[in-house]
Image (spheres, rainbow, N blue to C red):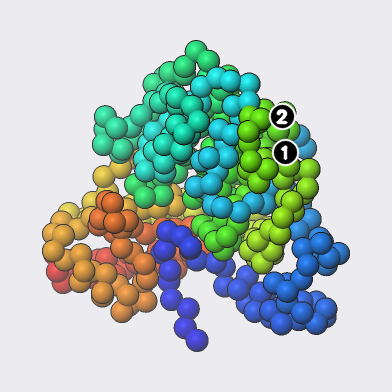
Amino acid sequence: MTRLFNFCAGPAALPTSVLERARDEMLDYQGRGLSVMEMSHRSPEYTAIAEQAERDMRELLAVPSNYRILFLQGGASMQFAMLPYNLLGQGGTPNYLYTGIWGKKAITEARHLASAHVAATSEGNGLTDVPRQEDIQLSGDAAYLHYTANETIGGLEFDYIPDVQVPLVCDMSSSILSGPLDVSRFGVIYAGAQKNIGPAGLTVAIVRDDLLELARPDTPTMFSYKVMAENDSMYNTPSTYAWYLAGLVFDWLKHEVGGLEAMDAINSRKAAKLYAAIDSSDFYSNPIATRSRSRMNVPFVLADDRLNQAFLDEAEATGLLNLKGHRSVGGMRASLYNAVPEAAVDALIAFMNDFETRRG
């Protein structure tokens, strides 16, 4: 079997050692004679798996004791709707920063319930630079401020945490666990799992305790953070196998990588290498302002877009998979999530240099 280098934006690469451990436990989990995916979520064996995963994530992110970690379903897109239901029970206007497609989707969903206010936008610069702190203008009755820490499609990442006097809500789907984080700065953090946490089908939300009491009275039961918190994320059957695999990823981060500070250094090094290769070339370019460049998702275009398909075909033949940019922006995109090894970035740079020499 040959493992190739996978630059997919999501579902994304998983650590090889995690997949190997899951393979070894697939048919017989720790001598129990059945697979984790066959277990009752109410069984003592599965409860232990779930509780360990939560403890490990809490330790990795140093999550304060007054926050609940919820393991949910529906992806980040469901969170776009869950948030206003859970945080607008006392009125007020939801506020948003608009820096890309995912932020726009969150705004659109909120407007089904309220008149969302855009507190700052990157539209004026073509979604190539995040708003600065001084650009953020909240509405007078702001209930919360939502932003997308890293726009997966556009490759735009905040280089700071907005400082506001209302609950700060963040979609961290493509940047969570990529480095240390001060969770106490936030009211709610949520993330689809399929980039840095585990496989698709799981969504993690970290919610400050006091915000569990702010839901609208018409909040559907399955949308309620409070209901999910009171039931340890098991009001209904959760995504048990995805939760288990997430726990293996947390264990990998703790014991093989050495924690989030070590992961942070690796991710910075990977991204710096690729951006340096792009910037030193007349054949490749990246449109994002330097301070707003994403470490997780690096979009780039070729000087001659007629060569795009040849680039993708030759890259795949070389063992470099899923480099095609999102259909809405075109070009190329290399996603450098935690599980993408530095060797993958080195191989990509070598291929890019060779392709430019031959085709440039």
| SS at badge 2 | helix
The answer to the question of whether label 1 and label 2 lie on touching residues, with beta carbons closer than 8 A, is: yes
Residue at (55% x, 33% y) in the render? 84
Residue that protrudes farthest toward the top in the picture: 140
Residue at (33% x, 35% y) in the render? 129
- Compare marks 1 and 2 and give the one earlier in the sequence: 2
Residue that protrudes farthest toward the front in the picture: 218
Residue 242's label in the rendered image is: none
**Which residue corresponds to mark 1?**
226
Residue at (46% x, 38% y) in the render? 109
**Which residue corresponds to mark 2?**
213
| Dot 2 alpha-carbon crowd within 10 angstroms: few under 14, some 14 to 19, many 20 or more | some
When asked about the image quadrant of residue 61, the answer is top right
Percent x, y for residue 183? 64, 37
- The residue type indicated by label 1 comes to Lys
| SS at badge 1 | helix
